[in-house]
Image (spheres, grey):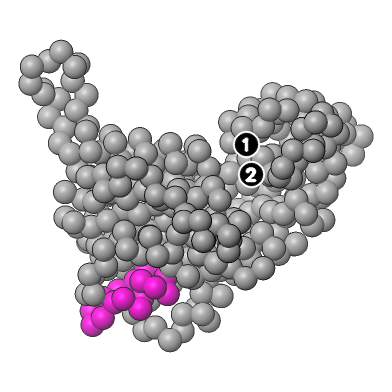
Amino acid sequence: MKHESVLLKESIEALNIKKKGIYVDGTLGGGGHSAKIAEALEGTGQLIVIDQDPYAIGRGKERLKAYNNITFVENNFSNIAIILENLNIEKIDGFLMDLGVSSFQLDDGQRGFSYHKDAALDMRMNPNIAVTAARIINSYSKEDLAQIFRLYGEEPFAWQIAKNIEKKRSIKPIENTLELVEIIKESMTEKEKKKKGHPGKRVFQALRIEVNRELSALEKALEDSEKYLSIGGRLVVITFHSLEDRIVKHFIKDKEKPCKCPPDFPVCTCGKVSTLRNVTRKVILPAEDELVRNNRARSAKLRVAEKI
């Protein structure tokens, strides 16, 4: 499937790009957002693109080879502070994060992200990290597995799936994606299996988040990127999961109204000052025509904040 960047028009508009500004795309992915940012820059304008997937970096260099204002960095966006320090960049004018899995990652059967194709249970966005989905499935306790499935996947059959995983792996290790899919299906009621959407979606999402430590990486990236934003610089984040969206929403809220004083205090005594302004009072969702073109945009949400 051809990769289509989600909320492309809306996110580029939200960045409010200055032609000679410095911007960071923390999640290069298929390169759609990066291309639009690079296209809008002129003169001394710079774009730093980050991705922990070496394949994405390779694809991006090929797709964006027409632009000479891009610096490619193979790393995790949670290391934004180190990356900018190494590049001798003190301030940036915008930071974009698209937290979705790229189509080429989902569609590459060897990566183990897809519940439609048989492959090793991998799910690593960075192939150099040690933890794979197979290691988690075969080594975590059933209690920890159930918690991950409930917390990161909002899976109603989390406990039954975890119990059945424990039972199956006692006979032999669970190594492939379709093996796991069968266990998930066996753990569900017939009524649940007939519902819209693949039965494995929630568990696979939960495993991907756990393998790649996605939520802790997001929290660190938000904190560090905000410190590097120039006044008027924009933080633009596209999420695909309620937990991700909640983290972004609360981060912006805490930076906009940071006072921790009890509500009955007549004046603030904590001394905390606002550093961000919430640009989008209501979350931005994909337009209907985008949903028709790209079903993977269905769960996308866009939030925007500006440095003050």
Q: CA distance from mark 1 to mark 2?
A: 6 Å
| Dot placed on the residue nearer the N-terminal end, 1 or 2 | 1
Which residue occupies 50% across, 64% down? Answer: 5
Residue placed furthest toward the front: 288
Is 201 on the left-hand or right-hand side of 175? left
Residue placed furthest toward the left: 267
When asked about the image quadrant of residue 77, the answer is bottom left
Vertical placement of residue 109 versus 285, above or below: below
Q: Residue 37 magenta-drawn?
A: yes
Q: Nearer the viewer, residue 154 or 222?
A: 154
Which residue occupies 39% across, 49% down? Answer: 284
Query: From where the camera sits, is residue 84 visible?
Result: no
User: Helix, strand, or loop for circle 1?
Assistant: helix
Q: Position of residue 82 (x, y in %)?
A: 35, 57
Vertical placement of residue 162 versus 172, above or below: above
Q: Which mark is residue 205?
A: 2
Q: Which mark is residue 61?
A: none
Q: Position of residue 208 (x, y in %)?
A: 63, 46
Identify the residue under disc 1: 153
- Magenta stretch, residue numbers: 34-52
Is 139 on the left-hand or right-hand side of 262? right
When asked about the image quadrant of residue 170, the answer is top right
Three-letter residue code for mark 2? Gln
User: Helix, strand, or loop for circle 2?
Assistant: helix
Three-letter residue code for mark 1? Gly
Which residue occupies 35% across, 64% down? Answer: 12
